[in-house]
Image: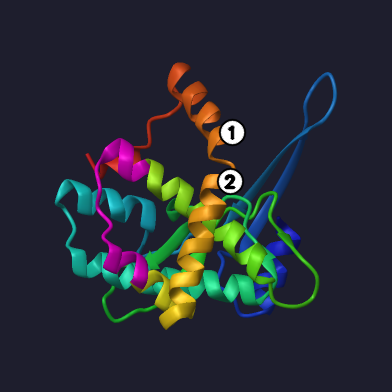
C-alpha cells in the first residue's frame, strides 16, 4: 500500500501521503500492519455526502460536483493502469469548498497496477462494476438518491460520450451483475452477524 501510494503520487494521482508505518508481531505468528496517512482537511468522502443528501442535510448541487470530480479521479486511476480493490464512494474524498475541484483516492490495500499502460476496457468495466454494485446496494437499502442524469454525469466526467457512454454503462451493469450472487451471500452474512450497517449511507446523525 505504501509503494502504491508513492507511485500514484508520482503519476499525479492525488492520494493522502503515508507518514508512518508500523508492524507489530502477533502471536502465534504473523504481523498486524498499520499505515498512518496525512489528514486532508476540508474534505468529505462521497459515501457520507450521499448519506447527507439522502438525509436532507446536503444539497444536490454539491453531489453533482462530487460526481464530476469522482469520475475524473477514477479515470486518472484507470489511465494509470490502476485497479482499486475496494472502489466505493467512501474511498473517494472531495473538497467541501465549492471553488476546489480536487479529489483524493483512499484505502489502496490489495489494489494493484496492471502492466505499465492504461487499463483495457474490460478491466475498466469490472472495476466500475464493483463501484456500481456497492452504490446500487446502498440505494436499495437506504433509499435512492442518484438519478439517471447523475450516472451520466459521472460517466461523462470519466470521459465517455454519446454511444460510448451507453456502451460503457451497459458493460458496467453486466460486470456488476456477474458476481452479484456471491456478493449477496456476503451481504447476508454481514446483516446476519451485525456488520452490515453503513453510517455514511444514512447521513450524519
Q: Which residues are magenta?
A: 138-152
Q: Between 169 and 157, which is closer to the camera in this rendering?
A: 169
Residue 52, position in %: x, y?
23, 51
Residue 182, position in %: x, y?
59, 33
Residue corresponding to mark 1: 182
Q: Residue at x 66, y 50 (%)?
A: 109
* Element at label 2: helix
In the orientation shown, which residue stands out farthest toward the left?
Answer: 56
| For discs 2 and 1, the disc positioned in front in the rendered view | 2
Residue 79, position in %: x, y?
63, 77
Q: Residue at x 54, y 74 (%)?
A: 75
Q: How is the image coloured?
A: rainbow
In magenta stretch: residue 146:
yes
Q: Quadrant of the C terminus?
A: top left
Residue corresponding to mark 2: 178
Residue 160 visible in image = no
Q: Relative to 100, is 20 on the left or the right?
A: right
Q: Quadrant of residue 95?
A: bottom left
Structural crowding at the residue carrying mark 1, measured as other residues with C-alpha within 10 Å and reported as few (<14), some (14–19) or many (≥20)? few
Q: Quadrant of residue 119?
A: bottom right
Q: Residue at x 34, y 79 (%)?
A: 100
Structural crowding at the residue carrying mark 2, measured as other residues with C-alpha within 10 Å and reported as few (<14), some (14–19) or many (≥20)? some
Q: Residue at x 71, y 55 (%)?
A: 1
* Contact (Cβ within 8 Å) of mark 2 with mark 1: no
Amino acid at each position: 500500500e505504501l509503494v502504491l501510494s508513492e507511485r500514484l503520487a508520482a503519476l499525479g494521482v492525488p492520494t493522502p501521503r503515508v507518514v508512518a508505518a508500523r508492524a507489530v508481531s502477533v502471536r502465534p505468528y504473523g504481523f498486524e500492519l498499520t499505515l498512518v496517512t496525512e489528514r486532508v482537511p476540508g474534505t468529505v468522502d462521497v459515501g457520507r455526502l450521499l448519506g447527507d443528501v439522502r438525509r436532507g442535510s446536503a444539497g444536490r448541487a454539491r453531489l453533482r460536483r462530487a460526481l464530476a470530480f469522482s469520475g475524473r479521479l477514477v479515470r486518472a486511476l484507470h489511465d494509470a493502469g490502476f485497479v482499486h480493490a475496494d472502489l466505493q464512494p467512501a474511498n473517494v474524498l472531495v473538497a467541501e469548498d465549492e471553488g476546489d475541484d480536487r479529489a483524493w483516492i483512499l484505502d489502496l490495500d490489495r489494489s494493484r497496477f496492471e502492466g505499465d499502460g492504461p487499463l483495457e476496457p474490460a478491466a475498466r468495466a469490472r472495476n466500475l462494476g464493483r463501484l456500481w454494485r456497492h452504490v446500487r446496494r446502498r440505494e436499495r437499502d437506504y433509499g435512492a438518491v442518484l438519478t439517471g442524469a447523475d450516472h451520466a454525469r459521472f460517466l461523462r466526467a470519466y470521459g465517455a460520450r454519446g454511444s460510448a457512454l451507453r456502451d460503457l454503462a451497459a458493460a458496467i451493469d453486466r460486470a456488476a451483475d456477474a458476481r452479484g450472487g456471491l456478493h449477496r451471500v456476503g451481504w447476508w452474512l454481514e446483516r446476519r452477524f451485525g456488520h452490515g450497517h453503513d453510517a455514511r449511507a444514512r447521513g450524519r446523525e
